[in-house]
Image (cartoon, helix red, strand yellow):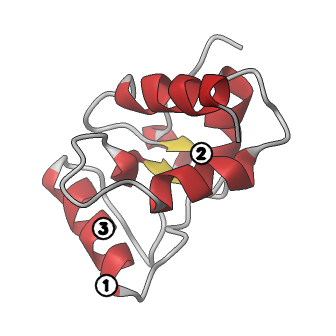
């Protein structure tokens, strides 16, 4: 991954408003790298502890929490619930996805 991609991803994730979510694929498309959804996930997983980047707002395209059932997934679910984003069965409905101007 190059610095340009990383910086673009961080900027896009930082712009997802509280109470909304986006998908790994949508973030990658917004960053100008439409086939790099997995790299977005990798960047989110490699954030240092205590990062202020709202990584918890990035989900799978189908709305599922990628790590549901794990400690990280439980933290993600709790953070979304704290922002009034309902999570049912480890999934967020499309109504809560941010609409990007692709």
Q: Position of residue 81 (x, y in %)?
A: 21, 59
Give above or below for 20 relative to 56: above
Left or right for 28, reference 99: right
Left or right for 35, reference 31: right
Question: As rendered, which of 85 and 2 lies closer to the eye?
Answer: 2
- On residue 71, the disc is 1
Give above or below for 12 relative to 71: above
Residue where numbered disc 3 is placed: 77
Is any part of residue 92 visible from this angle?
no
Q: Residue at x 30, y 40 (%)?
A: 53
Between marks 1 and 2, how big is the CA–CA gap?
A: 20 Å
Q: Quadrant of the C terminus?
A: top right
Residue where numbered disc 2 is placed: 23
Between marks 2 and 3, how big is the CA–CA gap?
A: 15 Å
Of all residues shown, which one is farthest toward the left?
82
- On residue 63, the disc is none
């Amino acid at each position: 991954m190059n610095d340009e991609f990383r910086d673009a991803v961080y900027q896009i994730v930082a712009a997802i408003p509280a109470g909304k979510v986006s998908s790994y694929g949508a973030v990658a498309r917004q960053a100008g790298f439409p086939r790099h959804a997995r790299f977005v996930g990798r960047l989110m997983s490699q954030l240092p502890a205590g990062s202020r980047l709202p990584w918890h707002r990035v989900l799978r395209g189908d709305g599922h929490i990628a790590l549901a059932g794990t400690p990280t997934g439980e933290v993600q679910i709790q953070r979304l619930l704290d922002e009034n984003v309902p999570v049912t069965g480890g999934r967020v409905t499309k109504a809560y996805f941010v609409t990007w101007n692709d």
